[in-house]
Image (tube, rainbow, N blue to C red):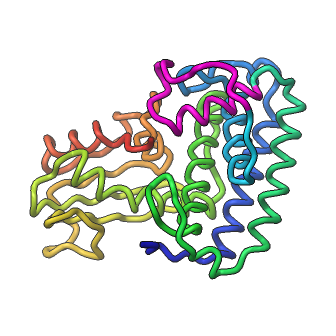
Amino acid sequence: MATTILPIDEVTEALIAQWGVIGELARALDDDAWSAPSVLPGWTNADIVAHIVGTESMLDGRDVEATRTVSALDHVRNPIGELNEKWVDHYRPKPRAEVVAALDEIIGVRTEALKAMSQNDFDAESMTPAGPDTYGRFMRIRIFDCWVHEIDLRDGTDRSAVAEPGPASFALDEIGASLPFVVGKRADAPKGSTVLFDITGVSPRTVRIAVGDRAGVVDEFDGGDDAADVRIRLDATNLARYAGGRRDADSSAVELHGDQVLGQAILSRMNYVI
């Protein structure tokens, strides 16, 4: 059942802004950076841009023919990964100008499609990478995906920092919605545990998770924040790297207080992104 109701205007604005940032980064890459290996196994920086073109093209109902069997590749772990690889393969032999033009074209198409939608359309049930939810939730996941890939492009080139707070806010909302799964399922935190994430940097916030029969986000802990069993402080960009299982996730930039065993279990199992 669809449960995540999000404001269409704000989400659409943030997604369009995030697409714009990806376009700016793509156009700023020189030939060497464009073809250089990215932070993602098996992909160049160009492949990251092609992946975004491919995902938005799929949402527009487009398809391309597979040119090889990709299921055996080390970095392809599921059917979604196979779809991603098909689009990356499609654009890999094409010149940079053609890939960037394809990005601009599909962003224009998707922008018009979103602007034509109503709030009711946004609230309608849809299949998303996180399971059945609203189309609005799906678009928040698109913000998250593009925002993480912005970080990938920056990490693979000039190490510059993300700066747009609007897309970052929705991307971090999406991560926050998945943290109970990380704490309760992946890290197997025992019932009664409380975990606080102090997220700094762009769009700072605090996420509090209490584990009962299921783990969930709460507004406050009995005894206040200092009573949390685990307190994890890290930058939003570093959190995104952890969530995506990126090689540049920096443990030295994480402050961990409280139960060290549980805290380390959470950090080591943070990579929930499919």
Residue 250 on image: x %, y %: 40, 34
User: Which residue corresponds to the image point at 84% horizontal and 24% vertical from the top-left?
Assistant: 94
> In this rendering, is residue 252 above or below 135?
above
**Quadrant of image for the C terminus:** top left
Q: State which region is magenta.
A: 65-91
Going by the picture, which residue comes out furthest to the front? 65
Identify the image quadrant of residue 12. Answer: bottom right
Q: Is residue 31 above or below residue 147?
A: above
Q: Give the total of numbered labels.
A: 0
Residue 72 among magenta residues: yes
Location of residue 260 (image quadrant): top left
Would residue 198 appear left or right of 113 to someone viewing this image? left
Residue 169 appears in the figure: no
Position of 10 compared to 209: left or right?
right
Of 100 and 160, the residue lying toward us: 100
Q: Quadrant of the N terminus?
A: bottom left
Picture layout, residue 244 above or below residue 82? below
Frontmost residue, 107 versus 245 = 107
**x%, y% of residue 163?**
64, 53
Relative to the observer, which residue lies in front, 77 or 238?
Answer: 77
| Magenta stretch holds residue 249 | no
* Left or right for 203, reference 163: left
- The residue located at (81%, 35%) in the rendering is 28
Q: Is residue 140 visible?
A: yes
The quadrant holding residue 98 is top right
Along the viewing direction, whichever of 18 and 196 lies nearer the viewer: 18
Left or right of 207? Residue 228 is left
- Residue at 44 percent across and 30 percent down: it is 77
Check the image and report above or below for 130 versus 205: above
Residue at left offset 10%, top offset 60%: 191
Q: Can you give x and y, in whole percent of width and height, for residue 23 in the image?
A: 79, 44
